[in-house]
Amino acid sequence: MSDERADWILDAAGELLVSWGYRRVTIEDVARRAGIGKGTVYLHFNTKEVLFLTVLMRAQARITERFLAAFEADPSHALPSELSRLVYLWVHEDPIIHVIMTGDPETLGTLVRSGADQLGSLVKARWRLMADYFAIMREHGVVRDDLEPEACLYAFASILTGFVSVDAYGADTAVPLEARAEALVHVIRSSFEAPGAAGRVSAAAPQVAELYRTMRDLLVEEIDRRKLT
């Protein structure tokens, strides 16, 4: 029952986040939407930030599962350019991640700061995943070797975050979503991928999938731990 009740809370919090925005939602609102008492919410999630960070983690776990399916269906999805395309499109498909990334710019910062304090191991694991990803890509000759791995990761994350979050700052959204995604692919491909990358990525894809599988398991473990409080 505890696990099911936590799901009600997370579902309610996610719905309210999308409808009202992070700032307007209170724990009382979540409890009312879930049909439970406010104290019950606090039994599972001791602060508003932890509750909504868990909502975000659940959305991230869903997307991570989609990556695993994509890598299995077509190893070329592991290319940095194709990986960025999927991230960009799926962020716009998932209402929870979309509202966090493109809605209130302060929301993501608040949740990340909360995560750094209270869920630091997961935050570090997400960054380590991408660092390991670029190490694998470099080992297989998929990405250029004229940038140090740390600088490569920083640049990739900055470009991707910029494309995802620019709508929050009044960008011209008259450009169709697919065209924006294609522009991102072009920038990532020309900036990071080595000549012949498409022919080398298949050998790297199983290792990339294993990284994402580990990340998925960490997310699920943390979410389940909170549900069973």
Image: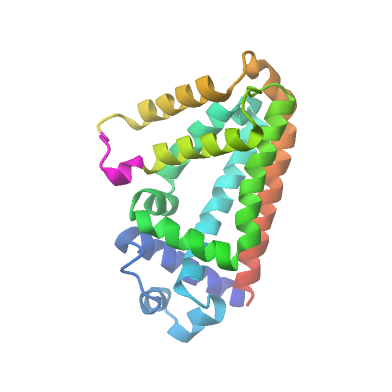
The residue closer to the viewer here, 67 or 21, is 21
The answer to if 167 sits in the magenta stretch is: yes
The residue closer to the viewer here, 46 or 28, is 46
Q: Is residue 138 above or below residue 129?
A: above
Q: Position of residue 61 (x, y in %)?
A: 58, 52
Q: Position of residue 171 (x, y in %)?
A: 27, 38
Locate residue 80: give its quadrant.
top right
Locate residue 22: give its quadrant.
bottom left
Colouring: rainbow
Q: Position of residue 175 (x, y in %)?
A: 29, 29
Q: Is residue 83 above or below residue 62?
A: above
Query: Which residue is located at x 62 percent, y 13 percent?
Result: 195
Quadrant of the image for the C terminus? bottom right
Q: Which residues are magenta?
A: 166-173
Query: Which residue is located at x 25 percent, y 42 percent?
Result: 170
The answer to if 181 sits in the magenta stretch is: no
The residue closer to the viewer here, 128 or 11, is 128
Query: Which residue is located at x 57 percent, y 67 percent?
Result: 117
Any part of residue 158 in sight: yes
Q: Position of residue 31 (x, y in %)?
A: 41, 78
